[in-house]
Image (spheres, coloured by chain):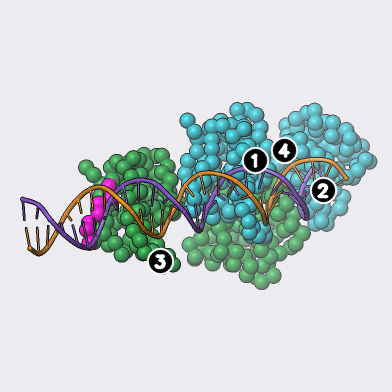
Chain colours: A green, B cyan, C purple, D orange
Amino acid sequence: MRILLVEDEPELASALKTALRRYDMVVDHAASLLEAGDFAASENYDAILLDRQLPDGDGLTLVPKIRARGNATPVLVLTARSDTSDKVDGLDMGADDYLAKPFAFEELLARLRALLRRPANVQTQVIRAGDLSFDLGHREVMVRGEPLTLPRRELLVLEALLRRTGRMVQRSSLMEAVFGLDDEIQSNALDTHVSRLRRKLAEADGKVEINGVRGVGYLLREIS
Amino acid sequence: MRILLVEDEPELASALKTALRRYDMVVDHAASLLEAGDFAASENYDAILLDRQLPDGDGLTLVPKIRARGNATPVLVLTARSDTSDKVDGLDMGADDYLAKPFAFEELLARLRALLRRPANVQTQVIRAGDLSFDLGHREVMVRGEPLTLPRRELLVLEALLRRTGRMVQRSSLMEAVFGLDDEIQSNALDTHVSRLRRKLAEADGKVEINGVRGVGYLLREIS
DNA sequence: CCCTCAACATTGCAGAAGCATTGCGCAATA
DNA sequence: TATTGCGCAATGCTTCTGCAATGTTGAGGG
């Protein structure tokens, strides 16, 4: 579990960091709004612990900013003030929970766990054909629930074909998808990969096949 | 509710004891660090009320000692000093909450209740695969009833893989789960941890294995 | 109708890239 | 300070992958 801790007071920050580490959390520490914004933008966190009082402004203003970028990371706000209007502010701005200082670490941990419990499993796009499914985000192919591990190049061939299941994919377009611009391929490497992929698909699935069309390219087809 | 009260000052101790009794709490009283250690080791308490100033040392030193034995009993620290560094110390040592003397008994009771509320709250999530189970909340791995203790980094690897048992976890995503920003990793450290974890899993369980997929990442699967 | 040639298919191979494992020294931890 | 964890680098190994050699297919022309 990866946590972004935004807290300017060095001692508290370091204490929290060690305490969280004891629960096997990976903690990045930002001491200012600016820093926090950068971190949140460039890394993926499972939760953000956010102090309101920061040298360069109210921590709460960070929340709408990252939400606007489509970042749904749960945010737990820490604040010294404890009146209820604060709490309302926080929730209005898109924070997920709120904790008044001074707090018991036990409580912080409990609330943090509650936030982390909700599945952070990002849904990624999955393409299906025959009995196989390709999870584009996780680069994973499954056949009837069993993982089918393929080498990188074959994976790329399969992806390009699957994206246009049942339709032609031009040879040139496949080349580009499989070998970027970097690789200068001057052989039948593509044919090779297609061939190897064919064999594996036949063994594992049997419900899809790759047809070659002379002079044009390839297409992947479900067999009925 | 069973409470261990660690307090050397006789008057305060006895007053607290009586007061807590009124709320149906069973209170054991230890007047020194030594005594407290014995009590904590031999009995199961729902919470520990711990004074820092004890005749034979700083009460706080008790906390890491009992934690090392795997005892997670919530600890509420009482102290005469009220500056924040105290609180920070407490966090570092693994205490759960902190109360400055003099305090209102009402507040003590409120904080104590907050700590005691925990067991109900913590419905810790357990992931299973093969013969092993991972208690996410208690950071505990068990194999056929036997605890398996793993170093932090290996535990993080295992957790990340276990959260997606049977499915692919990209290398980059594993890196994020295991290393923070501070750790500038420029070696095969991840591979190292995976390797060590593999060996331990093979020895202890034998029913799960970690497959590496070149160019993509790793996946943990149960073997039948 | 068959021959020819070009395009595609398949397979073995060798170089390379990526991964696995292990020992070591430093650092954090107890 | 004794111990454990950790990152790092060296080493060996597996797998990938581009290539070429050889086999196969199919379309068009004779």
The residue singled out by tag 2 in the image is: B103
Label 4: element kind: loop
Q: Which chain carries label 3?
A: A
Coordinates of residue B69 in the picture (x, y in percent): 76, 35
The residue singled out by tag 3 in the image is: A184
Instruction: Classify residue B145 by image quadrant.
Output: top right
Q: Is residue A31 magenta?
A: no
Q: Which chain carries label 4?
A: B
| Labels 1 and 3 in the same subunit | no
* Circle 4: residue type: Ala
In the image, what residue occupies the spot 65% across and 55% down?
A27
| Labels 2 and 4 in the same subunit | yes
Residue found at the very far bottom of the displayed protein? A56
Instruction: Classify residue A74 by image quadrant.
Output: bottom right
Locate residue B213 relative to residue B31 in the image: left or right. left
The residue singled out by tag 1 in the image is: B139
The residue singled out by tag 4 in the image is: B72
Residue B158 shows in the view? yes
| Labels 2 and 1 in the same subunit | yes
